[in-house]
Amino acid sequence: MSSGVFNVDLGTTIGALQIGSLFAIFLFGIVTLQAYSYYDAFPKDRWTYKTLVAVVWVLEAGHTAGVSYEVYHASITLYGKPNELVKFEALGAVTTIGGLITFISFFALRLYRVLPKPYKYIGVACFTLSFIRCVASIFMTVQSVAARNIVRYNTQWRWLIFSIFAVGAAIDIAIAASMLWYLMKQRGKGLLRITTVIDRLIGFTIRTGLLTSISAVALLICLLTMPNNLIWLALYTFLAKLYSNSLYSA
């Protein structure tokens, strides 16, 4: 793999990115529908919530544009030139957007507000780690845009890429597990009506937290076991949208 020239398996590189981009665009459509439904159903909601929904949608639009451009560049602009697939600047740029989306998702804050002491500080820890991950994502964007080829970039910064995704997976699992633990603990303490509400909250927590946790862990596994292809990057193209879907569902 010297000089950035290597044999390319199109199925696990461009093909993987195309499949990932299809999921990303599909999820962006759901995000758009969720945003429209929110503004239509809650026209008098607090301006802070309206702003949050708008900011997330704009970030997702930029994220989708970056992913789509990279797929077009790889499959059309560089058609017939697989050995020139040595940089993915647009995907590097959207790393910051993904970090911002996961950071402004308020699931860690929800833990702080819902859980009693001392368990509520799990939310503080998750929020702090989310902020650190966001800063690291910005740093990775700068490095990926400046890198001359993805092979050297992965070799030099693989430890940080792994750390970012590992922290993300740990945060998702901690948030989902903490909420489920608390709700299950409260389930048997109330009347039947309250228990029914708690059961609905448990189902909601599983729907919103389990999918992002599984996806983050799957990405981490792919990065560890298949570092020389782009399957892990294909998963990353739509991971941020799962957070947005979960946020809009809250």
Image (cartoon, rainbow, N blue to C red):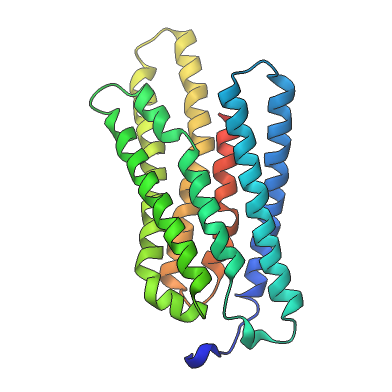
Q: Quadrant of residue 248?
A: top right
| Residue at 71% in and 20% down | 41
- For the C terminus, which image quadrant? top right
Residue 161 to residue 49: above or below: below
Q: Position of residue 229 (x, y in %)?
A: 53, 75
Question: Would residue 180 be seen by someone viewing this image from the given angle?
Answer: no
Q: Position of residue 77 (x, y in %)?
A: 75, 77
Outermost residue, left side: 118
Q: Position of residue 185 (x, y in %)?
A: 33, 23
Residue 27 to residue 8: above or below: above
Residue 83 to residue 223: above or below: below
Residue 189 is left or right of residue 48, and the answer is left
| Residue at 27% in and 28% down | 119
Q: Camera-side residue: 87 or 171?
A: 87
The total number of labels drawn is 0
Q: Quadrant of residue 174?
A: top left
Q: Camera-side residue: 189 or 121?
A: 121
